[in-house]
């Protein structure tokens, strides 16, 4: 673990009953977006609004952790009014908006009005490697870098503006296999491994990226807060296997109910809570419940 310099969290983070004063630890919430804070189909979050407002009132940072790009998440954090750091492209990058940071972890650079801490492998290397793998295997593989925003929109259901933002990639290249020979899919995974890269399978696409995941990035952000607060209590919410590494890092993991069942993970994560409702509705009740238990004097 890299040493992180001590830094001052913004004054707004420091105030309030959840700031580590009295007997209440400083609470930090990490959250996945699609199917978790955002509705799986409509991308709406209105049902989570009461809990989001409570977090704001009690100065509990809500850290978005997603496979989305910085460009997509920057738009969302403004709409959601979340001034906290956020984690993009499955742990590839950690971003600190100007307002939430006093000094920065080593290696962090100021780019496009935001502090950026790169953890993942640069996109150019991923695109180049995927091209080499395509040639080596002789398969028909099509990555986001080969696609127009119209094509991305058609494949993902995102509107054109969002598709353009989804194409501004830094640490992860999504791709499809249009045609493969009789070689096993393991040949693809092995070719990535030989290049010290990883392939994961998402809902719609395969992804090629460096050896990063949500959990490793979340761990860095937790250490960052621990430099400033003697007692930090961490909560994470997610609905998919790519959230499990994040759920493993926190004090209170919450699995958001979805159509999929993961019977094995209740055993893997001690104390994990599974919400009654799906998406933002589940997010709302689970967050209100846990904050009510931890914040001394109750939530307002
Ligand atoms: Mg999700």
Image: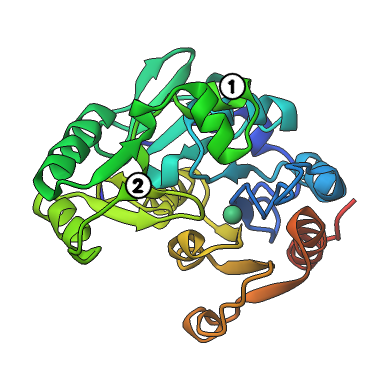
Residues under numbered marks 2 and 1 in contact, where contact means CB atoms less than 8 Å apart: no
Helix or strand or loop: what does disc 2 sit on? strand
Residue labelled with disc 1 = 99
Task: Judge the density around disc 2: few (<14), some (14-19), many (≥20) Cα neighbours within 10 Å.
Answer: few
The residue at the far right in this view is: 300
| Image x and y of residue 211, in percent | 25, 51
Residue 200, placed above or below residue 173: below
Drawn side of residue 292 relative to residue 135, left or right: right
Task: Judge the density around disc 1: few (<14), some (14-19), many (≥20) Cα neighbours within 10 Å.
Answer: some
Residue at point 43% right, 52% down?
Answer: 214
Q: Which mark is residue 178?
A: 2
Residue 100, placed above or below residue 38: above
| Image x and y of residue 161, in percent | 61, 20
Instruction: For marks 2 and 1, give the CA distance.
Output: 44 Å
Would you say residue 251 is visible in this rendering?
yes
Residue at point 49% right, 13% down?
Answer: 113
Looking at this view, is 245 or 293 the one in front? 245
Mark earlier in primary sequence (2, 1): 1
Residue at point 51% right, 31% down?
Answer: 152
Helix or strand or loop: what does disc 1 sit on? helix
């Amino acid at each position: 673990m890299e040493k992180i310099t001590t830094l001052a969290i913004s004054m707004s983070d420091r105030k309030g009953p959840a700031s580590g004063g009295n007997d209440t630890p400083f609470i930090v919430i990490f959250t996945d977006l699609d199917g978790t804070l955002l509705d799986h189909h409509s991308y709406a979050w209105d049902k989570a609004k009461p809990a989001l407002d409570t977090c704001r009132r009690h100065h509990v940072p809500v850290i978005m952790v997603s496979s989305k790009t910085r460009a997509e998440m920057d738009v969302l954090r403004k709409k959601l009014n979340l001034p906290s750091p956020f984690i993009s492209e499955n742990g590839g990058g950690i971003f600190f908006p100007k307002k939430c940071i006093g000094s920065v972890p080593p290696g962090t650079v100021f780019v496009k009005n935001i502090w950026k801490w790169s953890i993942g492998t640069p996109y150019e290397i991923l695109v180049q490697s995927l091209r080499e793998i395509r040639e080596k295997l002789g398969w028909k593989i099509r990555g986001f870098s080969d696609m127009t925003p119209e094509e991305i929109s058609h494949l993902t259901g995102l509107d054109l503006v969002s598709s353009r933002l989804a194409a501004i990639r830094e640490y992860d290249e999504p791709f499809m296999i249009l045609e493969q020979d009789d070689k096993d899919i393991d040949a693809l995974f092995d070719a990535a491994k030989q290049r010290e890269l990883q392939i994961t399978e998402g809902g719609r696409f395969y992804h090629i990226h460096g050896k990063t995941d949500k959990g490793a990035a979340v761990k860095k952000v937790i250490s960052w807060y621990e430099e400033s607060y003697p007692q930090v209590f961490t909560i994470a919410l997610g609905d998919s296997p790519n959230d499990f590494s994040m759920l493993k890092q926190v004090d209170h993991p919450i699995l958001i109910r979805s159509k999929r069942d993961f019977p094995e993970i209740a055993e893997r994560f001690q104390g994990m809570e599974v919400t009654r409702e799906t998406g933002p509705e589940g997010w709302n009740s689970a967050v209100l419940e846990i904050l009510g238990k931890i914040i001394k004097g109750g939530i307002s």
